[in-house]
Image (spheres, rainbow, N blue to C red):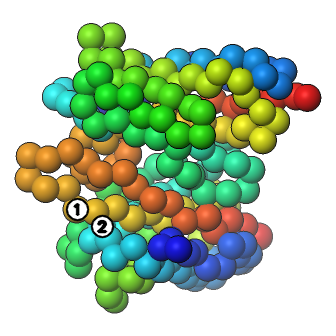
């Protein structure tokens, strides 16, 4: 089955120690997204890629970076995790919206639960 | 700006009860509308969608109709099961980028 895969499912890191979360997809979608979801809250978009074009949300902290080496893979790097970065990180993909067309649905991976000690 | 408002939970029901979770939206133009479901410790699963006025999305016994005149997309199910216990998010997408989510509604179904 085509899907979105995230590894690891659970990640523990120390305060200030860089960490990388990974996402891969077999849907061959052009667009990939990273969302942060804190406990009992809705997901919040951090950034997304249209193909190789990177788009950062205005309020995403500089501490968060992303890489997309090819269509299938996308990485989230947290350079110096703080206690406030503990959250579920969700990767999602979608087809690219055509000019004047409707937005397509996004497909989510199972998420990576990040704990910062 | 665009926004989604959904009823606050938790919603507690007995098995086989009727479910309604209200969702209204604010948007310029014609957004696509979605319901996502999140089981504990999991990512979001697309439950159903509608892309234009009067469209009805349906899946697994759940239904929602895109009502432009009332800017609503209420989720309904005729007979809930214990396995439906989860958090339900109403969302819209207009520009093709960020999903704009409601705050989520927790549903708890008991046998």
> From the image, which quarter does the C terminus of chain B lie in?
top right
Q: Are marks 2 and 1 in contact (CB under 8 Å)?
A: yes
Q: Is disc 1 surrounded by few (<14), some (14 to 19) or many (20+) residues within 10 Å? A: some
Specify whether disc 2 shares its chain with disc 1. Answer: yes
Q: Which chain is home to disc 2?
A: A
Instruction: Provide the residue designation for mark 2.
Output: A31
State whether residue B39 appears in this view. Answer: yes
Dividing the picture into quadrants, the one containing residue B26 is top left
Front-most of residues A1 and B69: A1
Q: Point out residue B91 in the picture as x, y percentages from the top left corner.
A: 42, 37
Instruction: Provide the residue designation for mark 1.
Output: A96
Q: Is residue B20 left or right of residue A61?
A: right
Q: Secondary structure at mark 1?
A: loop
Q: Residue at x 23, y 75 (%)?
A: A51
Gap in angstroms between the C-alphas marked 2 and 1: 6 Å
Q: Is residue B108 left or right of residue B91?
A: right
Q: Residue furthest right?
A: B111
Q: Residue at x 83, y 25 (%)?
A: B15
Q: Residue at x 78, y 22 (%)?
A: B16
Front-most of residues A103 and B55: B55
Labels 2 and 1: the sequence-earlier one = 2
Q: Point out residue B7 in the picture as x, y percentages from the top left corner.
A: 57, 19
Q: Residue at x 32, y 56 (%)?
A: A57
State whether residue B5 appears in this view. Answer: no
Mark carried by residue B52: none
Q: Point out residue B59 in the picture as x, y percentages from the top left corner.
A: 53, 40
Q: Is residue A85 above or below residue A24?
A: above
> From the image, which quarter does the N terminus of chain B lie in?
top left
């Amino acid at each position: 089955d085509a899907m979105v895969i995230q590894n690891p499912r659970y990640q523990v890191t120390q305060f200030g120690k860089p960490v990388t979360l990974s996402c891969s997809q077999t849907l061959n979608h052009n667009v990939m997204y990273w969302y942060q979801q804190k406990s009992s809250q809705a997901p919040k978009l951090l950034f997304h890629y249209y193909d190789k074009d990177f788009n950062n949300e205005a309020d995403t902290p500089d501490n968060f970076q992303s890489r997309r080496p090819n269509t299938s893979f996308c990485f989230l790097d947290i350079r110096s995790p703080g206690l406030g970065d503990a959250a579920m990180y969700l990767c999602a993909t979608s087809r690219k919206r055509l000019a004047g067309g409707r937005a397509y649905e996004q497909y989510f991976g199972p998420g990576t639960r990040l704990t910062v000690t | 700006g665009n926004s989604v408002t959904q009823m606050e939970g938790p919603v507690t029901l007995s098995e086989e009860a009727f479910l309604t979770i209200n969702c209204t939206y604010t948007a310029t133009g014609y957004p696509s509308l979605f319901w996502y479901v999140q089981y504990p410790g999991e990512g979001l699963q697309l439950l159903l969608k509608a892309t234009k006025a009067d469209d009805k999305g349906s899946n697994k016994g759940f239904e929602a109709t895109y009502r432009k005149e009332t800017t609503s997309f209420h989720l309904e199910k005729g007979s809930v099961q214990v396995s439906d216990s989860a958090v339900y998010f109403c969302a819209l997408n207009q520009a093709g980028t960020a999903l704009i989510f409601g705050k989520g509604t927790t549903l708890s179904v008991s046998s």
